[in-house]
Image: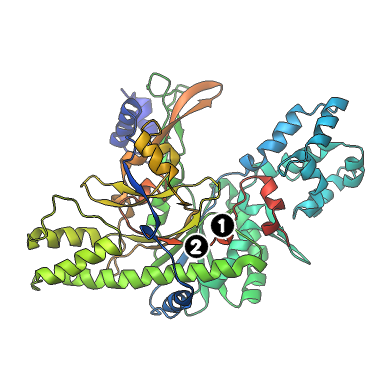
Amino acid sequence: MFSKKDLSLIKKRGMDKTKIEEQLKHFETGFPKVKLVNPAIITDGIMRIKDDEINVLRDYYLNRPKKLSVIKFVPASGAATRMFQKLYDFLNTYQETEEDYLAYMKDKSPEGMRKFFDDIEDFAFFVDLRAALQRKDLDIENLLEKNNFKEILNTLLNLNGLNYSNKPKGLLRFHKYPDYTRTAFEEHLAEALHYAKNYKGIAQLHLTISEEHKKLFARKLKKSKSAFEKKYDGKLKVSFSYQKASSDTIAVDLENKPFKDVDESLLFRPGGHGALIENLNELKADIVFIKNIDNIVPDRLKDATYKYKEALAGVLLKYQKQIFDYIAELDNKKLELSGEQLGEMLNFATDKLCIKTPKSLDPDNLGKLRAYLLNKFNRPIRVCGMVKNEGEPGGGPFWVKNPDSSSSLHIIENSQIDHEDKKQAKILGASTHFNPVDLVCGINDYKGKKFDLTLFVDPKMGFISKKSHNGFPLRAMELPGLWNGAMADWNTIFVEVPTITFNPVKTIFDLLRVEHRN
């Protein structure tokens, strides 16, 4: 199937020919839909922390052993293009006719262009935009008065101005403060210095970025680092990595044959955020906080985030200690364990880790029960914050049937569910919460050795979508999502967190929400 040129390219990209062949099979067969058992809800899969327990859990984390290392992991690759889609639509269709202007004036929606221009001075980037226009001998107030909207948008979005649509989202100015503004990246620096510091006061922050943006991030870090360290009394240790070319996936034509570019070379596409499991796999830390680059608020609203991040970490450490104690006993071949002891462990796995055992497991067969428990306990662990579903998009928490017929907790995306199946659709409709990518993870085993996280991915949880390249249609494959299939075989605990901890910026209009204003 592959020519010498194809094989050479595969090797050059650090890819494996067998994996490429597996991907091509997936295009032929598709990915199976997950089998939902029930939605995870409060009292059945989602833990609700009582008010008097929050500070106890926070203290459990804040008083952790000094040897435990902490890092904050932020997926931050890709440009902010999708944030500005509505602005581009307006730019491409507004012809400055009287009819266009009347339609503009009638639009009073919270995500309408009139709202954008009426409140333009409230954006943190406004000062930069005014300066960029002044460099062209243009005055923004004068342009607004004359309804010259296109010049303003061109200067904001494109290369001859601020070039915002091609910059990484992390480097856009998100928030205004009395005397300065902050980018999303800088807000994450502030967060890290609050809940990700070690006993020496050093906060580690790791971002996955596009290699083309490294200089921009490094420049911003150099400019901001000392000011944040001084303001929040700590030291920052910031590192970057890139999504690997070897994690890209092959594209195919509509007949599922490898898509060939204009130079007859194979076309590969980024495998989605699930590819970042390899970046996460290279980190060395006992505790990993994971949060998206755009889910950030100004300082005045961060207290709830700090409180619940520390509480989630407390849950992680509390459960992890019990798991490690059990594994030490199970792994000690010289130690004979009674049915009562193993039964206690099985109850913990069922009640606390939410792993419903398969019917085929005989609890009286102590040898098989011991092996089963060791296998279930000896895995990476994650505690996931869940917010009430108020119409925001995001993966939902569900009980899912596993290959071994056990059931456990998973974060499932809409695309993974069979909507034609009425029973599955009913389960989906009964879901009450969703995951805002708010995770605290333990990636080391009970001996302190790091797990190979790639061994806990469910490769059947990818999906296929329709795309195009140079005007030609193609089919593309995304790997199992980072917090979906890439963590499918982890021990998972869901904890309800308040909605104030979830304030993503998906479109430019989100920055006008009260949560993002100072």
Q: Position of residue 365 (x, y in %)?
A: 7, 59
> Residue sitting at 32 percent across and 60 percent down?
380
At mark 1, the secondary structure is: loop
- Of residue 303 and residue 43, the one placed in the foreground of this image is 43
> Residue sitting at 16 percent across and 67 percent down?
343
> Residue sitting at 74 percent across and 46 percent down?
162
Residue matched to label 1: 502
Residue 497's disc number: 2
Q: Position of residue 217 (x, y in %)?
A: 61, 55
The residues tagged by marks 2 and 1 sit, at their Cα atoms, a distance apart of 9 Å
- Of residue 316 and residue 349, the one placed in the foreground of this image is 349
Q: Are marks 2 and 1 in contact (CB under 8 Å)?
A: yes
Q: Is residue 452 visible?
A: yes
In which quadrant of the rendered image does the N terminus lie? top left
**Quadrant of residue 160 in the image?**
top right
**Going by the image, does 52 lie left or right of 225?**
left
Q: Earlier in the sequence, mark 2 or mark 1?
A: 2
Q: Is residue 13 visible?
A: no
**Going by the image, does 170 lie left or right of 201?**
right
Label 1 crowd bin: few (<14), some (14–19), many (20+), radius 10 Å: many
Label 2 crowd bin: few (<14), some (14–19), many (20+), radius 10 Å: many
**Going by the image, does 120 lie left or right of 388?**
right
Q: Is residue 59 above or below residue 441?
A: below
Q: Is residue 164 above or below residue 192?
A: above
